[in-house]
Amino acid sequence: MAESRGPAPAGPPSRSRLGRWLERERVFRILPLIPVQALVLALLFVPMVLTVYISLLRWRITRGFWTEAPWGGVSNFLDALTDEGFFDAVGRTFLFAGGAVVLELALGFGLALLTYQSFRGRRFYFTVFLIPMMIIPVVVGYDFSMLLIDTGPLNAVLSALTGLDVRVRWLSEYRAAQVAVILADVWQWTSLTFLIFVSGLAALPRDPIKAARVMGATRWQVFRHVELPLLKPVIVIAVVIRTMEALKIFDMPMLLTQGGPGNATETISIYLWRNAWIFNKISYAAASSLILLVVFTVLIYLSIWLLRRERRQLEAETAR
Amino acid sequence: MIRRRHVFAIVRHALLLAWTLVVLFPIGWMVMTSFKDAGDWVSWPARWVPFVDFEPTLMNYRQIFHFGDTGALRREQTEQAYNIWKATFDSVVIVTVASVVSLLLGSTLAYAISRFRTGGPNYPYTVLTIRMLPPIVVAIPLLIYYASLPEAFTWLLGRRVEFFDTYYGLTLLYIVTTLPYVIWMMLAFIDEVPRELEHAARLMGASRLATIRKVVFPLVASGMAVTLLFVFILNWSEFLLALTLSQPKVLTLPVLLNKFQSAVEGRLYGPQAAIGTVVTIPVVVLGFLIQKHLVKGFSFGMIRR
């Protein structure tokens, strides 16, 4: 890579002014950055700065514009940090994400192990397993809300399988509703972990595996000591990507239970959404958003650090 | 040995078939419900077999598309709630424009990053933060911002410019939120184009622009198509920002679907199922078109196969 990075050969002298201007390397290097940075600045950075200011006020959207709102100092931050509901929502979100991601990884990995070699019917399974992640999350949420009604098909199937009269109140019982949200997420996103693992397994370098086999390692030993270490970057990437996505969870609980019953499925996204749009406590929601922003900045840095490390590892592997 | 292999094959198929059923069951149920008449939506015991347990009907589809006789009783609800034509139009316009613009901005930047290290080695990773941040953290600041912008414009230009509940308000956001995917996917595709080709073209006297147009672009065109479709799917599914910052004037399909969900006067499972089915079909088709590249997309091009 380094040798081809040398000074680019000069093109022909251009007659037009625009042509000559475009011929400069600096133009090519900087020009594409400008619109992107402008958009990020205008749509993410400025709103954030504005939010810092709003979070220091006591503004409710029902009471005029924020320029007329009274000063509140850090009271919103204190309110959020002393509100049990806020911490419960954060805890619940991590619980959902953790539970869902663990299940998705286990199922996805298992299914990938069963499917990555070629056998008759592989193509069919592969195609079917990919469908869920292409369906819009809102549709999945709606679909499950229909499957999970008390007299719905899931209870019917469970009854038929167990021979009992199963009437789990999926959407109106505290624990059951939490399980329902995780189930819907697992149903949809196992397809992604499956896909990632199948790709990872298929891309494993053949030589070390063959060598281990030749030297008399059993199938299990090859898996445990050769394939799994080689697969580690892919696993970490899957964990990081899925976790960060799962923490955003909003669509499914919103469609399934609107955060209820009570606050059983009130994830952080729904908690903030309710505060802003149902209770109109904009300043409070702004302060909570900023607290979350800090939390997520830490998480994101950690994720990116992990992704970078594993990506380097992955590139070293494929280069081999 | 042969026995053991047979046992393994059987177990494998049993497990895979089990998951196949798990995957197909919710989809099958939704599609089936979309063909059921009101009395069959919710019933115990459930009605499973078309033509035996229930008589399939196109009523729900007629209702959502305002096509033919929808029955006098439900007409009122029909007219206020199901404006699927309008929602489809809004979704298509916003998602298409946002995806195309995002693709153009993102690919040119990806090219600059790949060839000139624009923004430094950390830049692509910085961009990733946009995607990792939960949308709700951005949504509330944006709500405040969109509420304030018209005032700012009035003050600056003497003219009110609305952002809340407008096409461009949402489109701009979709451009920004999908840029990380475009940049990372296109980086993966552009990195695969050998620099030697460009150097050769330059030596033969082609200008930079011509080199890109005639050498680089043909080689990454298919990658751009894949990226476009991927981003299209993402935008098509987006819910939180649309729910927050558009509505009621601009209404995308996911928001429309949510509207029925919170309807108090009895849930209308049938029409909802019909909408769900209609909304899903194009995305699944697009998804399978780019099946080989889905991994690349979802892993930000880190897993390339």
Image (spheres, coloured by chain):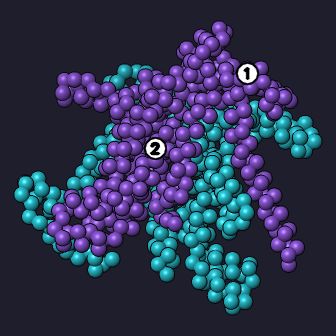
Chain colours: A cyan, B purple
Determine which quarter of the picture holds residue A173: top right
A237 relative to B104, above or below:
below
Report the front residue among A223 and A62: A223
Question: Where is mark 1, residue-wise?
Answer: B37
Q: Are marks 1 and 2 on the same chain?
A: yes
Q: Quadrant of the N terminus of chain B?
A: bottom right
Give me the disc on residue B48: none
Q: Chain of mark 2?
A: B
Q: Chain of mark 1?
A: B
**Residue at point 54%, 39% (across, down):** B282
**Residue at point 41%, 46% (across, down):** B177
Side (left or right) of B184 relative to A268 = left
Q: Report if residue A232 is visible in the image.
A: no
* Secondary structure of the residue carrying numbered label 1: loop
**Other-residue count near label 2 (Cα within 10 Å), few / some / many at <14 / 14–19 / ≥20:** many
**Residue at point 40%, 35% (across, down):** B94
Question: Where is mark 2, residue-wise?
Answer: B232
Side (left or right) of B119 relative to A114 = left
Q: Residue furthest top?
A: B72
Mark 1 and mark 2 lie on one chain; the one further toward the N terminus is: 1
